[in-house]
Every structure is written in structure tokens, then in C-alpha cells.
């Protein structure tokens, strides 16, 4: 699962959250899941975001701008991706690309 801001003033967007190896039967994430303060299932990894650390980094567009935050879940043909906590969003995306069966996204706007 990822959260990506394509409107960030970087020329390449901004990864706000990257979570890998969620069990296929996951239906709900408990409140605080991305904070690192809530236990996650064994094997689930939150990787490094563009904030430089793992976990969810909230929306913070520059004053006066509205940004899109795209949350995407991916169904993969493997149970686990071979990445660690230091993997970037781009590296996770590269691995997801080769194992994707389907994906679904929802876009939130924030100013």
C-alpha cells in the first residue's frame, strides 16, 4: 500500500507512506498503524518515505496549494516482497510492477 503526492514541488512527487507485505486478507488498518506506535502483523514492513524515515508522513502542501494524495493497494502474485525498511518508494514500486495482479486507488485532496 502506498500514499503518493504527485503534486509535490520536487519534479518527481513525494512518497508519504509505503507499506509492504500486508497479509492478503487485511481489510482494516487500526488507527495509528502508520505512526509506528501500533503493533503490525509479523513480516509487515513500513519502508522509508521521502521524509527520510519509515511510517506515514501526513499531508503538508505549500500554503495556498491543493495537492492530490493517492492511496493505492496492490494485489501481488507473491506473499512477500524482498525489500527492507530502507527501500525507497521507487524501489518498492519497481518490485510491485513485476508482481502486480491488480491495484485500486483512491485520491484525496488537501490544501
Image (spheres, grey):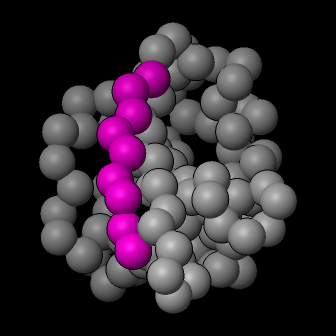
Q: Foreground: 72 or 48?
A: 72
Residue 106 lies in the magenta-colored region: yes
Residue at position x 45%, y 56% in the image = 69
Residue at position x 22%, y 55% in the image = 29
Q: Is residue 20 above or below residue 85?
A: above
Residue at position x 57%, y 73% in the image = 54
Report the magenta stretch's main SS: strand
Residue at position x 24%, y 39% in the image = 26
Q: How many marks?
A: 0
Horizontal side of residue 103 vs 50, given as left or right? left
Answer with the quarter of the image where residue 107 lies: top left
Residue 83 can be seen in this image = no
Instruction: Find residue 65 and report its horizontal and vertical position in percent.
Output: 51, 74
Q: Is residue 96 above or below residue 83?
A: above
Answer with the quarter of the image where residue 73 lies: top left
Name the image quarter holding the N terminus: top left
Horizontal side of residue 110 vs 101, given as left or right? left
Q: Foreground: 33 or 73?
A: 73
Residue 72 lies in the magenta-colored region: no
Residue 41 can be seen in this image = yes
Q: Foreground: 110 or 27?
A: 110
Residues in magenta? Answer: 103-111
Q: Which residue is the extreme one toward the front?
A: 64
Instruction: Find residue 42 and report its horizontal and vertical position in percent.
Output: 39, 55
Instruction: Find residue 63 and report its horizontal and vertical position in percent.
Output: 51, 87
Amino acid at each position: 500500500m502506498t500514499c503518493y503526492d504527485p503534486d509535490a514541488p520536487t519534479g518527481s512527487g513525494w512518497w508519504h507512506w509505503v507499506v509492504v507485505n500486508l497479509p492478503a486478507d487485511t481489510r482494516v488498518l487500526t488507527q495509528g498503524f502508520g505512526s509506528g506506535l501500533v503493533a503490525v502483523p509479523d513480516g509487515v514492513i513500513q519502508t522509508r518515505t521521502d521524509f527520510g524515515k519509515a511510517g506515514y508522513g501526513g499531508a503538508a502542501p505549500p500554503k495556498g496549494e491543493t495537492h492530490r494524495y493517492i492511496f493505492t493497494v496492490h494485489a501481488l502474485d507473491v506473499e512477500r516482497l524482498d525489500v527492507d525498511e530502507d527501500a525507497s518508494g521507487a524501489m518498492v514500486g519497481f518490485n510491485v510492477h513485476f508482481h502486480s495482479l491488480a491495484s485500486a486507488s483512491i485520491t484525496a485532496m488537501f490544501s
